[in-house]
Image (cartoon, rainbow, N blue to C red):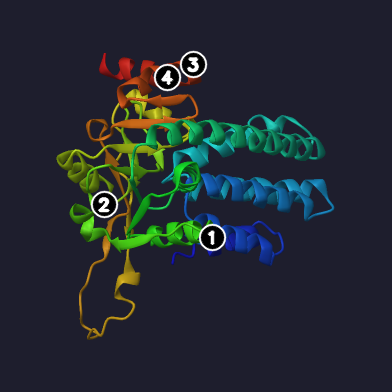
Amino acid sequence: MPDHRLIYAKEIVDAGLSAPDDMTMALLEKIVDEGVLGASNHIRLTHDLLMHLMAAADDPGVAWLRTEMAASFVARVRGAQAPVVNTAIRALMLDLDRLKPAERLATLKKRIDDWQATAIERRKRLVDHAVTVLRPARRLIPFDYSSTVANIVIAAWSDTGNREIIVPESRAVAGGLRYVEAFAKAGIPVHMVLDAAFEQILEPDSAVLFGAESLRADGSLTNTVGSRPLARLAQWAGVPVYGGTDLSKLDLRSYAGPIDPPPIRQFDMLLADADLPSTAEVRTDGPELEVVPPDLITALFTEHGTIPPADLWDLGRREFGDSATIHQDKAGDQRA
């Protein structure tokens, strides 16, 4: 497991502040060090972190400094892989430096409360759309953990029951296990299989479900490695592939053209139980995320309805207006 939170602890001490308390480190472990999966969960936990830091110091100036440093750190570390985390934090912190410390804290608290209230309503609309579309599917196959997809599966099960839920384990971040835990707590029987068994589980009346670390304007999405081959096999087998995600995960930079590939990480945990000589040279670097292109996605479940991937470009332009246009115009300037 990564130890990014230790970098934050050093930055805080280097800034002349006392070391982070246990609650701060526990929340950071969940957000930046894979203690909890799912970008939507990480936004919610970042809210918890910022609220904790704002309440933890009597001096508004100190409380703000700790809060600002934590927000910047999460945006820099977690936001590098999940742009929605970076976007959410930037929206929370926008123009707060123009206010006095006490006013910054009060404004930030209100923004967090407002975000959470609207997020609940957006999630409900998204799940309702998904349940309607998935009603004919007798077998649901969610791949790699997404809190949005977990909500969809639980709601779909409650809607009709009598479904088979098959969870392929994603060994990159053990995302399948998180699904099994969530479904078991909801009283849903689960069949867990290896991700190498994709082809064997794609039967008629199935539906594959992906969450998304991010959406791109062309209708593609990024998800854990293994998603693209599963989508290809599903298309070959005539099984629909759905992405379930809030439109806030649309990476507006994609209006300007291709985005850099997802970052490479080390998977040294794969060697934890290996009996290797000291001279062994073994590389474990590789991608954790990959892009699933729009031609492999049947539809996207969003709070605005169920849409074909090709419609995402215009929907994003309508929803985000100038923010999307700016990126698209920059691309045009560069091409000229």
Report the mark closest to the observer, 1 or 3: 1
Could you say where residue 96 lies in the image, as x and y percent from the top left?
Answer: 69, 33
- Residue type at tag 4: Leu
Report the mark closest to the observer, 1 or 4: 1
Viewer-nearest residue: 173 or 102: 173
Q: On residue 226, which mark appears?
A: 2
1 or 3: tag closer to the N-terminus: 1
Locate residue 40 relative to residue 58 in the image: left or right.
left
Dot 3: few (<14), some (14–19), or many (≥20) neighbours within 10 Å? few
- Asked where in the image residue 200 lies, by quadrant, the reply is bottom left
Q: Secondary structure at mark 2?
A: loop
Label 1, label 3: how far apart the Cα atoms are: 43 Å
Locate residue 58 relative to residue 250 in the image: left or right.
right
Q: Which residue is mark 4?
A: 315
Could you say where residue 313 lies in the image, as x and y percent from the top left?
Answer: 36, 21
Q: Which residue is mark 3?
A: 322
Could you say where residue 113 lies in the image, as x and y percent from the top left?
Answer: 71, 37
Asked if one can make out residue 171 in the rendered structure from this viewpoint, the answer is: no
Give the number of marks. Answer: 4
1 or 2: tag closer to the N-terminus: 1
- Residue type at tag 2: Gly
